[in-house]
Amino acid sequence: MAKKRVVIGMSGGVDSSVSAHLLKKQGYEVVGVFMKNWEDDDSDGYCSSREDWIDAVSVADVIGLDIEAVNFSAEYKERVFSDFLREYQAGRTPNPDVMCNAEIKFKAFLDHAVRIGADYIATGHYARVRKANNKFELLKAVDSSKDQSYFLHRLNQAQLSKTLFPLGEIHKLDVRKIAQQLKLPNANKKDSTGICFIGERPFREFLNRYLARQPGPIKTPEGKLVGQHIGLSFYTIGQRKGIGIGGIKNLQNADGCSDAWYVARKDMINNTLYVAQGHGHPWLLSHTLIADQASWIAGTAPDLNCLMAKTRYRQTDVAAQLDVSNENQFQLAFTNPQWAVTPGQHAVLYQGDVCLGGGVIGNFGH
């Protein structure tokens, strides 16, 4: 019987490299694809795609599999980056990794893989897929410190039915050990933490190339003028550093304390940035939120009132009440108010280890 063919996205990093090895060990016919999705400024030192390609080829050689490079930069620009810039221009803080997964890794890449005869695709994400009651479920990874289900919550049944996550049951420490045992050339390579496919670079400087600066006032919740911002697009809710009001950081609040200042609100109509003093300021706490562009892994909204939610990737799951107003929107009410809920980020819902889906945070209530 012919082996099942798996086409794996190989980034040149240790996770996708070990994933390819594990798949081969499991008896699949494994083919590597290196995705090139950014080429605007490939030569400036931040976009490391040339080195990553060399690493991916070296690893494929050690493991013993064919690899090809495929350029999805046009799709990335059209489907991910244009949306990313639109969101920033509207004063929100988008998460391009979520869109990149939904539109590139599990759409453009999946389509390409199917064209070259793939039965499945695979990536080095830390997550799991399980079939239960004739539906595919997305589950958190066993290694909770590396779980990436948050970034995968927009995947649908068709995508999950074709996807393998070889690292779902493995801890990161063991992945490194496997890479070292195999003597992979990238065994000790540092994990990438930059924007999906754009690399690690000074972020404000990067946005400067694409977004116009529109300076305006920085005010306190009481309306006191305390500085000038460079443009609302360049700030995010909860931001503490780089606000540009360092000279007043020791201003005492009503309790006589000199707490740090945080970005608390953006008034797009009046081009005003509001900052609040103290981590626990009421303007930084939200009891409710409304999320748009709802996406449900099962295809329909969960029939649950009480579940767990994350409003940012590194957050611990928190209890929330779900109210689905229509197929594109839902509301969450939190048992405990959440800090720095940020428009443009994603509210992702869970029942235990099962990721149910999520949406883009729009409005929130204090």
Image (cartoon, helix red, strand yellow):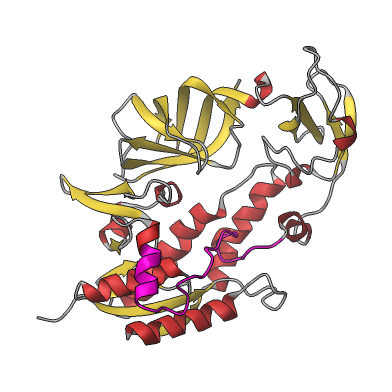
Q: Main secondary structure of the magenta part?
A: loop
Q: Residue at x 47, y 82 (%)?
A: 69
Determine whether, in the image, residue 260 is placed left or right of residue 76. right
Q: How far from the left and from the top, in percent, is residue 356?
A: 34, 40
What is the x, y in percent for residue 351? 31, 34
Choose between 31 and 114: the one closer to the eye. 31
Extreme residue toward the top, this view: 255
* Residue 233: % across, % down: 74, 46
In the rendered image, which quarter contains the N terminus? bottom left
The location of residue 277, given as percent across then percent down, is 76, 24
In front: 94, or 56? 56
**Hey, which quadrant is residue 166 in on the image?**
bottom left
Q: Looking at the rendering, in which quadrant would you find the C terminus?
A: top right
Is residue 123 positioned above or below 153 on the image?
below
Quadrant position of residue 199: bottom right
- With 151 as the anchor, is 77 left or right in this view? right
Residue 141 vertical placement versus 103 (above, below): above
Residue ID at (61%, 65%): 198
Question: Which residue is more in the foreground, 184 or 132?
Answer: 184
Name the residue: 26% across, 59% down. 161
Q: Residue furthest left?
A: 1
Vertical position of residue 256 compared to residue 350: above or below: above
Q: Is residue 69 magenta?
A: no
Q: Is residue 232 visible?
A: yes
**Residue 196 part of the magenta-drawn span:** yes
Q: Residue at x 71, y 48 (%)?
A: 89
Identify whether 313 is placed above or below 198: above
Residue 5, visible in the rendered structure: no
- Residue segment shown in magenta: 175-201
Numbered label tally: 0
